[in-house]
Every structure is written in structure tokens, then in C-alpha cells.
Amino acid sequence: MRRAVIIFTAVLGFVLTSLGFGATSALAAGESLQGTLINAGQPVAGVVINVSDESGTSAGKATSGADGKWSVTVKGAGTYKVDLDTTTLPQGVTVTNGRPSLTLTVFEGAARNVLFPLGQAAAPGSKPAEPEGSSTADRVFDLIYTGIHFGLIIALAALGLSLIFGTMGLTNFAHGELITFGALGCFLLNVTVGLPLVVSGILAVVLGGAFGWFQDRVFWGWLRNRRTGLIGMMIISIGAALVLRYVYLFAFRGDTKQYAEYVAQPGMDLGIISVAPKNLVMDVVAIVVLLLVSLALTMTRLGKATRAVATNPSLAAASGISVDAIIRLVWTIGGALAALSGVMLGLFQGVNYQMGFQILLLVFAAVTLGGLGTAFGALVGSLVVGLATQLSTLWIPTELKNVGALVVLIVIILFRPQGILGRRERIG
Amino acid sequence: MNWDIIFGVSLESLFNATMIAYALAAIGLNVHFGYTGLLNFGQSAFLGVAAYGLAMTVATFGAPFWLGIVIGLAGAVVLALLLGIPTLRLRADYLAIVTIAAAEIVRLLFRSVSLSEWTGGSDGLQAFSDDFYSLNPYSSGLDIGIVTFDVRELWVMTVGWILVAVSLLVVFLAMRSPWGRVIKAIREDEDAVRSLGKNVVSYKMQSLILGGVLGSLGGFVFALSRAAVQPDTYGTEFTFYMYTIVILGGAARVFGPVVGSMIFWFLLAFVNALLPALISQGYIPTWLMDANQAGSVGYILVGLGLVLLLIFRPQGIFGDKKEVMLDGR
């Protein structure tokens, strides 16, 4: 039954997130493309940016302001072509990487940053940068990298979700709000208080862990003692998510905000793809954290106790393990991991009150796909989800990529409900 | 403070078309969740399919109104079959997965650009309700003091309340019949029912179709009262509201969903009307809350209500705690 509940919730979550909670919530955030044009430290004003959608029809136009900033609000998530009108650049200034036209994907509710590195035009006679050769291969590599990057962000949240489900059986719909908590906490410390981003990120993760501990201390632990049913708790978590999400909206308003630093970082050319260093740093941090937690689960006594509680709580309690303490520890770790995921997601797509909720369904999908109760399953499932949603845009319209992912998820659940790495005996 | 308007709006929501649509949807969901124990989290898809079936038949293909109703109902039945045939045989819980997934697939397809020639994309469809309103027998609206309904509202409400009454009668009769006893027994212990020689899958499928068709009536009322269909209204939040309504009124009770819907909308409309008024009158200082923020308070209260109900009174107003399926099976 527990498995059934999580699977079903997984899909629920998956669908919700992947599609955004557009629905009746009147406060859906608008998707937009934005950027700042800077040449040699000075903002560049009066440059015209044209945005068109996949069919080539114009989706908006903007002119950079005195601070070099421009922003185009688009109708919805999807792939857009952003053209910088080079004739409007000041004399002698050019786009240094020779790519004044970019094709980018905008996610649900996200404000996508677009970077046009500007610089002095090369002396006449020297050749301009070679335009990209085979654009399809480039796009594939780009999508693969984005998929892995996105998958790692999902994996951080998925690991916590999987642990909480494993130990207390709760399919936690409010996990997305833990993700948002991390991003909003980091935003507050970084922008409002003015701490450096790295410091505020670390503090946000600590706060996220404290928030997880606190939730279990005052709420979920109390419900456990009351012997609330699992389906009841699941619906309670839906209500709790609703409360938290709209408290965030109340406090932070509905628009998508950016951190104060590292918002638009020029990409490093790595041969086949161009990646901003911040993304590589995040990837490394995510991989190290995931490995550490997974190893701790398998190698340490505490990890063994956690797995014992997940397998059979009564037997674990009988052999002297404090089940409540383990669950509280898992909530703390889960909260911290989710907050880290939120901090990174905020850097990836901006900070928004419903960012966690929008990604929650992908997190559920990753947990289900990877198989419950396996330490590395969440990671594998997350990478599959990240890659699948990104790469499917090669064949199907971006707006329908989640339909494809959804159908695949249903098929997997029908034929292999224990997930990719799950063991059959765990699901009985 | 204009208390007349605040109370007027709240009282209107006790009877208006939105409340009726949610009540009908919740009556259907009650058949699934309350009586049969099916965790259907995609009830909004049944409403969406019915509403779009009607709207597309009339607005896109120019067919008559009644054909649209028939196609909308047929769409709900087909959806139930599509969901049920592959999943009911496996385990009841898989239904939940497939329903939620299907609900979002349906919504995504309705709003996709590739199909916008027929569905109108994210803008939806209009101009399909003229035939319905031309049947309107009323010549003037209703105005009793603080509550006013115009002619069109009055006609939708009349039809809606008739549908509610018929649906309640159907549920009442179905659940006290031998069929209903089997359905409730499936909720309590599926294996026991199977061992008595009943075809559990077939019964569940019938329940899924019945609840879906009842819900689709809500879809018609919803679409006709707005004279428009728009894909994003049929999202998952719709289903969450229905669950709150079913649990508030009391699962597995005939009148539960209607009473739940009335109370739910009365309170929500009251809060949503009261807060902006308090702010504009200066009773709530703007540093605490402005008119934009007032909108989120309603959602916070719905979530809080759902949490408190499930903790302290999972059986809702009328329900019996033993009949609410909230424990893991």
C-alpha cells in the first residue's frame, strides 16, 4: 500500500509540477526572457532584441534601457529564438562570440536570462568568430548537459523525499515547499540582507535543515503519535503545501526574482558545449553531496539504522533503534537537501513562490522511476527524468514534452512498478 | 464597509452556478472516493472532457446543442473506460496515477498550440451556449434585497439545481440497492468481495463511469455559466478543491458533497469579499496586507481547513469515521 500511495502521489506530483499549477490559481507567474547588455563594464542602451517562437512568429520585442537591462514577457513556456539586432549596437561594438541569435528554452514560471557578451569589434580584416557549424549536434549536447544539470538538482530533492517516504511512509506533497524555502531563504540573505551568495546559500541549507527538523518536531511527529492514516497524512500534506505556498506568495509576491550575484555569467567554451562556471560548480557540489549522503546511508551505523527503520519499523524499534529520532534526522537531512536543491534551482531559473511546487512532480517521477528504498535510485531516476524531458524536445513540441514524459512514466509504472533499481521484494 | 455587498456575494455563493458545478463534481467524486474507495485524483478531466465535448461540437463544428451534450457525456464514459480498462485489473491505486496523469494530459492537449484549430488553445472556446440560453423561460432576474441573480444566472441555476437533485436521487437509490452494497463492500475489503464471486473489476468500472458522468454534469454547468471553456480551469487544483468539499461534507454521505460545497463557497466568497473591503476602509493597515495579498489568504485558509479537517474531523460534517478510507491498505 505504501508503495501504491507513493507511486500514485509520484504521478500526481509529476504531473502537477511538470505542467505547473496553472489551473485555477490566478497568480500564475509569467514566463519571460531577460538580460543585461554590458560592454566593458558600461551598460549598453538602445539595443533592439527580437523574440520569436518556434513557428517563427514574433513573440515580443524589447529595447535595452539606460541600465542595459531588457526583458520580454512571453506567453508561456517553450522554445524561443532571441535575436539581437546588431545594427542597433553602438559603433564598434559587437557580440564577441559571433552569436547574436540564440535559441533558448523557457521553463514554466521562469525568467530565463539571456547573455550576449559584447566587446569591441575586431579590427577590420580579421575574421569574425566562426558561426557554429552543425547546430543539431550542438543542440543535442546542450540538451544533454542541461538534462544532467537539471537532473542533479532534482536528485537532491528526490533523495530527501525518498528517505522520508521510506522511513515514515508519508508521501510528502509539501516537499516542494521545502525546496522553495531554500531558494527564498537564500534570496532573502543574499539580496535583502546583502550577504555573498555562497554564504547565504550555505545558511539557507542550514535553515532548510532546521525547518525540516521543526516540521517533524511540531507537526508530523505529533501526527504519527496520533496514528493518523497514511492516506490521511498525504492529503494533510497537500493542505500543508497549499498553506505554505500561499504564505510564500503573501510574503514574497508573485514575480520571479533573481539573486544579486552570478545571474548572468558568461559561458566557458568546453569544446562541444558552452557552460557557465557556476553551473559546473553546482554540479560538483550536488554530486559530492549526493555521494556523501548515499555512502553515509550504506556505510555508517546511523545509515544502517535508517535503512532498518525503512525496512521494518517495529523490528528496528525492538532492536533498540529509536525510530522517532531516526525519522527526525531524516527530516533534517531531507530539509537541508531540498533547500540546497532550491538554492541551485533559484540560480538556474530565478526565485518564485511556486518553483518548488512546479518541480515537485518531476521529483516524484524521479523517485518512482528510480525505485523506492534504494540510495542510488533517486539519482538514476532524476537523471533519467532530466534527460528525458530535455531530449524529448528534439522530436516533440516543447509545450508537449511533459505529455511524453508522463506517458513514459505511466508505462513504466504499469510494467515495472518497483522502478529501475527497486527490488521486487521491497514493494509487497 | 458595505456589509450588504459582502453578505450578498457570500449568500449568492450558496446557490450560484459555481457552487453547483463543484457540488456535482464532488457528488461524482464521492461515488469514487467515498463509496468505492477509488483514489481518483483526475476528476477535473471528466469535467474538462464534458465541457470541451460540448463546446467543440457547437463552436468548432457547428452541430446542434443537444448533440454537444450527448458527445460530452459520451466523452466522459469513454474517458472512464480508457482509464479503467488497463488499470482497474491491476490495483485500485494505479487508478489514481492514471487519472491524475490523464487529467493533465487532457488539459495539456486542450491548451496545445498544435490543436488550437479545434480547441482554441489556451484561450479556449466561446459562443456555444446561445442555444441553451435561448431556452430560458425567465423574463426577468431575481432581486430579493441583498441577493440578486440576473436572468441568465437564474436559468443556469434552475437547470443546475435540477441536475443536483437528480444526481442525489441517483446516488441515493444506487447506494441502497444491492449494487451499492457491493460497491461499499469493495471499499471495505476487496478480497472478501472477490471471494464471494463478484466481479470486482466490473463493479469498479461501473462506479468509475457513474461518478465520471455525474462529474461531467458539473462540467456542463461550469462551462455554460461562463459561456466559455478555458483549459487551465480544469487543472489539478480543481480536483483538490473537490476533495476538500467531499471531506468537509462527509465522504460516503448522499448530501455531503452539496452541503460541503455550499459551506466551502460561502466561506471562501465571504473571506474574498471581506478582506479587500477591510483593506480599502483602512481597517487592515497596508503594511500588513494589500489588496493583492488578500487573494492568497483565501488559499491559505482552504489549505488550513483541509489540514484541520483531516486531523480533527476526517469524517466531515455528516460522515461516519469508520467509512472514511484514510488508512493505508
Image (cartoon, rainbow, N blue to C red):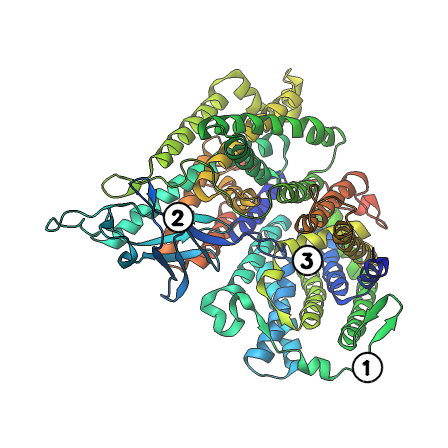
Residue B51: x, y in percent? 63, 70
- Where residue B133 appears, as percent x and y from the top left, is 72, 80
Residue sitting at x 64%, y 53%: B237
In the image, taking residue B99 as reference, residue A388 lies left or right, namely left
- Using the image, name the chain to which the residue with label 2 belongs: A
Name the residue furthest left: A125
Disc on res. B240: none
| Circle 2 residue | A35
Write down the quadrant of residue A63 in the picture: bottom left
Q: Which residue is more in the foreground, B277 or A152?
A: B277
Q: Residue at x 75, y 67 (%)?
A: B17
- For badge 1, the amino acid type reads Tyr
Rendered residue at 61%/78% (across/down): B127
Three-letter amino acid code at disc 2?
Gly
Marks 2 and 3, how far apart at CA: 54 Å
For the residues labelled 1 and 2, the Cα–Cα distance comes to: 57 Å
Q: Secondary structure at mark 1?
A: loop
Where residue A134 sits in the image (x, y, percent)? 22, 53
Residue type highlighted by circle 3:
Lys
Asked which secondary structure carries label 3, the reply is: helix
Q: Position of residue A209 (x, y in %)?
A: 57, 27
Disc 1 target residue: B138
CA gap between label 1 and label 3 equals: 41 Å
Q: Which residue is mark 3?
A: B204
